[in-house]
Image (spheres, rainbow, N blue to C red):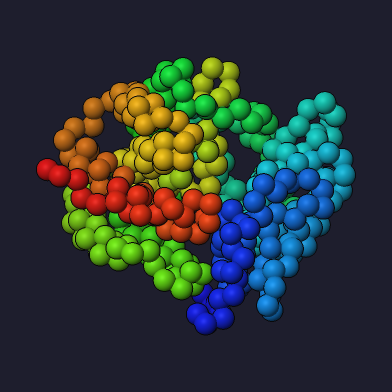
Amino acid sequence: MKVQAAHTRRWLDTAERFERLDVARDGTILGRIADAEGSAGTPLWCAWQGEAWNELRLEQDLELPFSSTWLAHAQAGAQLLAWRPGRRAVARLVAREQKSSSVVVKAFRRKGLEAKLARQREVWDHVRRAGVTVPDWIGAHTDDALVMFQDLGQTRPRLRAADDALFHDLGTCVAAWQARPAPPAVPTHSASDELQAIDALAHKVLAIRGALPEHFQPLRDELGSKVLAQAAGPQVLTHRDLHDGQLLSFAGRLAILDFDLACCADAALDLANLSAHLELRALQGVCTVDMAQALQAALLAGYGDGGAQFSKRLDLWRRATYLRLALVHALRPPWSALVPILLDRARPTLP
């Protein structure tokens, strides 16, 4: 990752205007504009080029073939839901066949597209057969490097008392898809791979901020030795990015989105990730601490008793999630004050 030298990090002087900082694949510093909407012609990101921030627009993203048709879709009423420059985009489009309906499309780079789409279709079929609610797979267009899904709306779980049953059902769903043999095409994700992902994120923080959060490195080293030394748990199909932002309330259940990172990994990884994110939401004021704990309990009750060894692995994976979240929020200026708290959650629990 090539970035400017530390003494030229002038982008930090104006970083507070952004809700998120990132590094592009070519090393360019990126900032996502706070409260930006995905309407036609509206920039969502800026890039530090020369000595100033320059606005970016999806129609200029030559890495994504979908960018060439985006303005036409936007003029027809499409809404940009998410976009990472040079990586992927998600948009809600007006269906051509039925003007009153819509579909959600996910656009990718062309490199490795066919294998990625085939793997995603396998995973989608796998979790659906396990009884998990996911959007219908409508089809794929290789020319535009995108896949189309059913539009389930935008109703997120509110993380209130009424969601207890939904999270219990979600835990049951996770157990159900784990009980089925994982599709052969999905990659593996070991404890070593997780540490490498954390280290890559730490490198990004160092490139943008010029320093890692205080106490991060000793926590990473201590946790790394324990994660690598632990006995490997059952390797099962894993979402690998399961948090409340990937959930939609639909037809009385929680639908799960975005299996892009699906892999074969420790059975405790997904539950640990979602559990840590629920505590993060309490820190952000989205829900109370008591409610976060109640939803965690409902999730684990729905999943079932994994035994003492599972609980130990769950604790380690949860700590790893907190360590990663501390780095993520070091690059999110509005929430950077949470970094020391998240690092504290990554510390060893008392026996």
Can the viewer see residue 172 in this picture?
no
- Relative to 209, is 228 above or below? above
Residue 152 position within the rendered picture, expressed as x and y whole percent measured from the top left: 64, 28
Is 100 on the left-hand or right-hand side of 311?
A: right
Viewer can see residue 308: yes
In this rendering, the count of numbered labels is: 0
Give the percent coordinates (x, y) of residue 48.
Answer: 66, 71
Q: Where in the figure is residue 320, as x and y percent of width and height?
A: 32, 52
Q: Nearer the viewer, residue 160 or 246?
A: 160
Residue 148 horizontal side relative to residue 350, left or right: right
The structure residue drawn at horizontal position 43% and vertical position 19%, both measured from the top left corner, is: 161
Which corner quadrant of the image does residue 143 belong to?
Answer: bottom right
Tell me the residue at 69%/79% (across/down): 50
Along the horizontal axis of the image, is 65 left or right of 19? Answer: right
Residue at x 62%, y 61% (from the top left corner): 31
When asked about the image quadrant of residue 203, the answer is bottom left
Q: Residue furthest left?
A: 351
**Horizontal side of residue 251 vs 67, given as left or right:** left
Depth check, front residue: 346 or 165? 346
Give coordinates of residue 97: x percent, y percent: 84, 31
Closer to us: 334 or 201: 334
Q: Quadrant of the C terminus?
A: top left
Reply above or below: 62 against 175.
below
Identify whether 138 is placed above or below 67: above
- The residue at 87%/48% (across/down) is 72
